[in-house]
């Protein structure tokens, strides 16, 4: 080891291309710039999951798509991305980080440009699927590089950076999308990726020198494993996306995908345990820290994507906000994350990571508990404290989770493990959204039925309310006062039922995150992330 250090130090003009990690605190500028380019590429890939969510109505109008077809603009991206994320570990070992990341950045950029040229919904779905699949290769590469090329003493800077991007990008996606589509047109949701994408791809090809390709792995590529994984994860994503809105297995397409998912899962896990070089190496889960970190990442995915979905639905359905107003109201969470990231980095070196996670989980639970007192009048200022708690707590969770999950793995395991770790967060989001949607639908029906029992002709309070409303409407010329009053009263009942169902979901999230804060007590104390170069051994 001493010889290697002397040799590297005696040839300052040559890049250490094959070295997986630097023993000293000094980092070559070349590697830092390469890593920053990778981080920006990951930001674009994650941002594009949510950037269209606030602008689907504009895209629908532009492509003359039906209301059933337009959700596929988002679903196609998610399904394709969730297949690539775990696959990227094998591809990175086979092709090298440089080739995989450059190809992913260039392909993502080209697919973004194609999506902007789409003239019908079929083209858009195909281009979005390509965009999600190729772009998904960038995300795990950044996590693997962060824990491979940087010494443990640099993790207080690096871990908050990638944690911030992973949480901030989906949070501000609807806001950014709303601004772009209002200021210009929906085409710019995709065109805006082109110039940064070209720069990222160029920088990646010129600067990344972290590892070497192993082309011999191509002859051992497990095609059956890939087919099984694609069927398993792709159909699972579809079932979770579409199931809540179509009464789950009662819908033929969801039922068919559930069967394909089951068969794909059997093939995938059979190949994982029997293939010479499995497409995904699950041995990383034998590391207790990684297993717990992945579990926490799954739950963080539920909170991250769940609230990114819930807040806009509340503001749109109850308050009647458009995409621009929703974006402005929810920008606080992004600011809170941004300002908490450096604090989280400092704390990760100063206090027990378990305590830091507990503070994050309890803070998140406090924010969702605050939302259980929701009313139809809640606006920016009422949502301010819950959003600040959400943003700060998410960063306090993500940084220690990243360090616990990936910080103690050997370098040869990191590429596969990074794909699995990111997959758990995405699957957590998919499962969380499915459960949230199901609860919203079921509890809304339940609360409406209960409230309707009290708003009947036999109810004195209901009769008085209806009579007062009828008198008010009688003062408006050309209106059937009785019908208008009944319609208004029905709308009030529906709104209250929707509010109560939102409260139920926020209470469910409160219990989940509060219990996780307690569960952290049972984890073994992680090794310190330390100030020296050998802290990760």
Image: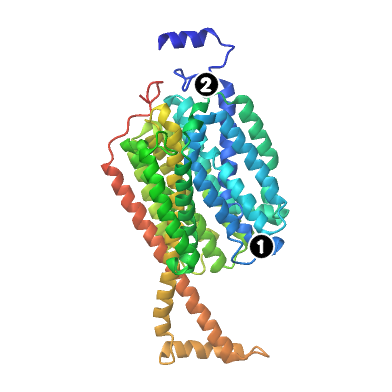
Depth check: 368 or 281 in front?
A: 281
Depth check: 502 or 460 in front?
A: 502
Residue 99 visible to an observer of this rendering: yes
Whole-angstrom CA distance, mark 2 to mark 1, is 48 Å
Could you classify mark 2 by the number of other residues whose Cα lies within 10 Å: few (under 14), some (14-19), or many (20 or more)? some
Q: Residue 283, located in which quarter of the rendered image?
A: top left
- The residue at the point 37 percent across, 57 percent down is 510
Q: Is residue 458 left or right of residue 95?
A: left
Q: Is residue 239 left or right of residue 350?
A: right
Disc number placed over residue 317 in the picture, else none:
none
The answer to whether 149 is drawn above or below residue 143 in the figure is: above
Name the residue beneath numbered marker 1. Answer: 60
Q: Residue 106, located in which quarter of the rendered image?
A: top right
| Rendered location of residue 337, percent (x, y) | 50, 44
The answer to whether 69 is drawn above or below residue 167 in the figure is: below
Name the residue beneath numbered marker 2. Answer: 27
């Amino acid at each position: 080891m001493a010889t290697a250090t002397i040799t590297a130090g005696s040839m300052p003009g040559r890049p250490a291309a094959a070295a997986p990690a630097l023993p000293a605190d000094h980092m070559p500028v070349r590697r830092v710039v390469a890593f920053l380019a990778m981080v920006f590429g990951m930001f674009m890939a994650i941002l594009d999951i949510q950037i269209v969510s606030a602008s689907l109505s504009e895209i629908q109008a532009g492509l003359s798509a039906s209301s059933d077809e337009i959700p596929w603009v988002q679903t196609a991206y998610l399904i394709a991305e969730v297949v690539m994320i775990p696959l990227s570990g094998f591809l990175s070992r086979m092709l090298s980080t440089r080739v995989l990341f450059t190809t992913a950045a260039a392909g993502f950029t080209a697919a973004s440009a194609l999506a902007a040229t789409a003239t019908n919904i079929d083209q858009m779905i195909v281009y979005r699927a390509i965009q999600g699949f190729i772009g998904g290769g960038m995300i795990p590469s950044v996590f693997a590089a962060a824990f491979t090329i940087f010494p443990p003493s640099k993790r207080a800077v690096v871990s908050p950076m990638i944690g911030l991007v992973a949480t901030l990008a989906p949070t501000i996606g609807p806001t950014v999308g709303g601004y772009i589509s209002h200021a210009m047109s929906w085409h710019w949701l995709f065109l805006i990726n082109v110039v940064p994408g070209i720069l990222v791809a160029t920088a990646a090809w010129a600067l990344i020198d972290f590892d070497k390709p192993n082309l011999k792995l191509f002859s051992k590529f497990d095609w059956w494993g890939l087919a099984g994984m694609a069927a398993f994860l792709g159909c699972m994503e579809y079932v979770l996306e579409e199931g809540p809105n179509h009464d789950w297995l009662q819908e033929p397409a969801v039922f068919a995908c559930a069967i394909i998912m089951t068969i794909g899962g059997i093939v995938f896990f059979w190949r994982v345990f029997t293939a010479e070089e499995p497409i995904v190496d699950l041995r990383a889960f034998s590391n207790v820290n990684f297993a717990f970190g992945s579990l926490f990442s799954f739950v963080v995915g539920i909170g991250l994507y769940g609230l990114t979905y819930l807040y806009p639905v509340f503001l749109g359905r109850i308050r009647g906000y458009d995409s621009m107003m929703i974006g402005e109201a929810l920008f606080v969470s992004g600011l809170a994350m941004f300002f908490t990231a450096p604090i989280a980095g400092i704390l990760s070196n100063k206090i027990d990571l378990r305590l830091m996670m507990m503070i994050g989980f309890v803070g998140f639970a406090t924010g969702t508990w605050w939302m259980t007192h929701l009313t139809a009048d809640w606006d920016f200022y009422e949502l301010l404290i819950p959003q600040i708690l959400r943003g700060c707590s998410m960063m306090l969770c993500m940084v220690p989770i990243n360090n616990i999950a990936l910080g103690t793995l050997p370098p040869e395991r990191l590429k596969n493990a990074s794909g699995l770790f990111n997959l758990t967060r995405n699957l957590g989001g998919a499962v969380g959204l499915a459960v949230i949607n199901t609860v919203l639908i079921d509890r809304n029906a339940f609360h409406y039925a209960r409230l309707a029992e009290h708003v009947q002709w036999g109810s004195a309070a209901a009769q008085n309310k209806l009579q007062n409303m009828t008198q008010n409407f009688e003062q408006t010329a050309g209106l059937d006062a009785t019908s208008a009053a009944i319609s208004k009263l029905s709308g009030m009942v529906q709104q209250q039922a929707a509010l109560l169902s939102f409260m139920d979901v926020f209470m469910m999230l409160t219990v989940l995150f509060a219990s996780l804060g307690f569960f952290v007590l049972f984890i073994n104390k992680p090794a310190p992330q330390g100030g020296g170069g050998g802290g990760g051994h």
